Structure formats: structure tokens, C-alpha cells
Amino acid sequence: MFKQPLTTFLLSFSIFLGIFVSSVRAVTVAIEPPTLLNIDGEPVTAEIPRTTNRTPTFVGRCNLPFANMDYEMRQPTILGTGKADAAGLWKWTVPQQLSYGFHVLYVTATDPNDSTNTETSTYRIEVTRGGVTIVRLGLSWFLGIVVLALVGFIVYKRYRKGRVYA
């Protein structure tokens, strides 16, 4: 008594499931070259960005969420790996100090479901020495140093003027 409705139900369900499954297709997203957004929180706006930090942190974006990321710098060779997050953002901190001068950062994004779907971007970075500037010390420090220099000069002149030569 229940065999015929059960058989009909199972047959109908199988046909429905077969139609549904056959309509699902695997979608491959072409990965795009990763972009560099900022270095140590400073937006990248120049063609060759500069930093005074010898172990900078790079942040960028990839169009594929959860992409496998590979990082490389040469001279000396520094390698790193990571994953982009759900929004495609990636982050890498150089694990050892870079020398002053120009360096090249290679960032490769790879589709975690298809290792042949990969793109690499190259970024030239300059590491510069941090200099002491009026802006960094602040105007009050600069004015204080100027006032001390003037007081020292006045004291020196009075001392020389009061000195008697034999």
C-alpha cells in the first residue's frame, strides 16, 4: 500500500535532484594582479613609494577572496606566504630588516581551487633614512634650540668683552 507512493516520491525526487544538480556549474573567476594599498598605514600614491621603516608592513587587495598569497623580495631573498581574507585583503610584514635603498616586492595571488589560475604584481619600494626635521621635532623644540643658541652667543660675547688682555 505504501510501496507505490514511496516509489513515486523517490522517483520524482531523483528526477528533480538530477535536473537541479545538472544545472549547477562550476564558475572559475579569472584572478587579477594583486594591488598594493598602503605601506605601514600610509596610502601608496607614488609610483615608487618610500618608507623609513626597515621592516615595513604591506597591505593590498586581490579580487579573489581567500586567495593564496606569496611574497618575495630579493637581495637578500626574503619569502613569505599568507591568505587573503573574505574581502580579498592581504597583509605581509617583512620579517627581517631591509637595507636602505631600492627593493622589489613580488606579490603572487593564486586561486586556492585552481593552482594554474595565478597572477603576480611587482612593486618597487625605496627604504630611506629617517631624518631629523623641524616638523618631526616640533616648532617649540626648534624655537627652544634657537633661543639657547642666542643666549649662548650673548654670554660668549660678554665674557670676551670683559676679559682683559695682557
Image (cartoon, rainbow, N blue to C red):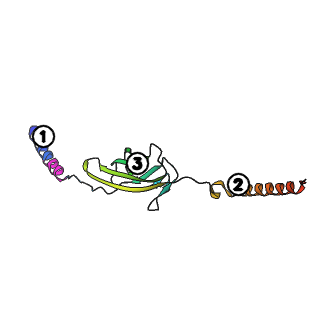
Residue type at mark 1? Answer: Leu
Q: In the displayed structure, does residue 37 sit left or right of residue 136?
A: left
Q: Is residue 3 visible?
A: yes
20 within the magenta span? yes
Q: Position of residue 6 (x, y in %)?
A: 12, 40
Q: Nearer the viewer, residue 31 or 131?
A: 131
Residue that appears at 30% across and 54% down? 119
Q: In the displayed structure, does residue 148 sit left or right of residue 22?
A: right
Magenta segment = 15-23
Residue that appears at 37% across and 56% down? 122
Residue type at mark 2? Answer: Trp
What separation in Å lies between label 1 and label 2 (alpha carbons)? 89 Å
Disc 1 versus disc 3: nearer the observer: 3
Disc 3 versus disc 2: nearer the observer: 3
**Does the CB distance between marks 1 and 2 fall below 8 Å?**
no
Quadrant into which the N terminus falls = top left
Q: Check disc 2 and report its element: helix, strand or loop.
A: helix
Q: Is residue 35 visible?
A: no
Residue that appears at 37% across and 52% down? 106
Location of mark 3 (residue): 75
Location of mark 1 (residue): 6
Q: Position of residue 41 (x, y in %)?
A: 50, 53
Q: Check disc 1 and report its element: helix, strand or loop.
A: helix
Q: Nearer the viewer, residue 120 or 22?
A: 120
**Does the CB distance between marks 1 and 3 fall below 8 Å?**
no
Residue type at mark 3? Answer: Gln
Q: Earlier in the sequence, mark 1 or mark 2?
A: 1
Location of mark 2 (residue): 141
